[in-house]
Amino acid sequence: MSDATAVLEGADLVKTYVGGDGSIVHVLDGVSLSVARGEIVAIVGASGAGKSTLLHVLGALDVPNAGTVRIGGRTLAGLDDLALAELRNRSVGFVFQFHHLLREFSALENVMMPLLIGGEDEGAARRRAAELLERVGLASRAHHRPGELSGGEQQRTAVARALAVEPAVFLADEPSGNLDHATAEVLHDLLVTLARDLEIGMVVVTHNRSLAGRADRVLLLENGRLSHVPVREEVS
């Protein structure tokens, strides 16, 4: 049954792969979770446990073998590739460990890109991008290319880009994994503030104890299943 308060839901998700020996590997084995507006959920677990796979399934980058995903109350099952892409581009913001910014474009142009792809007027896209860069503390760096930005500035630009289309759901895969401690803490503060202020449902895959500790809930993915971890418990 769908949770009317959730912006993101996964129900009984199964994802399998065929191993090198021909055996079936259950990466996700009946995973269920829901994320409310403004809530931060951290997913932790050992490397190779399937955390990124779960994030990709929740964000419509991958399709489960079984189970249901709903984004903003809309079920993904049965949607064709075009409809999935449209829903993903309109409703989901992604940030990965590596920023994937386009190096030939400025920070402002990178943030504008999703809006232009979605058919937004260039002037409106420019204004929106400038507002977002100011929000993440990069107004003075708007016309710098990625190679002229620090690692933390590049990642904050990626966050601004992910928010350009005002998504209901924000998914981050090890967003601070490539940053030093001090820079990571700045990013963590920013993510929490954005989730609260913009009321975005946020799912963060992380090995970082500080970031996991800021979440409303911490879930451990192990042997294809999710279990609750007390927020203050040490995570590896």
Image (cartoon, rainbow, N blue to C red):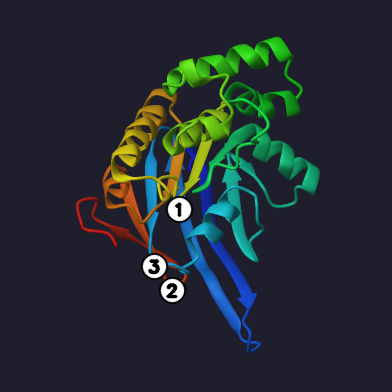
* Residue linked to disc 3: 46
| Alpha carbons under labels 2 and 1: distance apart | 16 Å
Few, some or many C-alpha atoms within 10 Å of disc 2 (few <14, some 14-19, many ≥20)?
A: some
Which SS class for mark 3? loop
Identify the image quadrant of residue 93: top right
Which one is earlier in the sequence, the residue at label 2 or at label 1? 1
- Residue kind at label 2, given as amino acid type: Asn
The answer to which of 213 and 78 lies nearer the viewer is 213
Which one is earlier in the sequence, the residue at label 3 or at label 1? 1
- Label 3 vs label 1, nearer the camera: 3
Which residue shows up at 45% across the image and 31% down it? 153
Residue 102: x %, y % from top left: 65, 36
Which SS class for mark 1? strand
Which residue shows up at 31% across the image and 49% down it? 212
- Residue kind at label 1, given as amino acid type: Leu
Which SS class for mark 2? loop
Which label belongs to residue 54? none
Work out whether 96 lies above or below 50: above
- Label 2 vs label 1, nearer the camera: 2
Q: Find the residue positioned furthest to the front.
A: 148
Residue 167: x %, y % from top left: 56, 31
Task: Please indicate, yes or no, whether residue 5 appears anywhere in the rendered image.
Answer: no
Residue 48: x %, y % from top left: 48, 69
Which label belongs to residue 223? 2
Asked whether, in this view, residue 120 is left or right of residue 167, the answer is right
Which label belongs to residue 33? 1
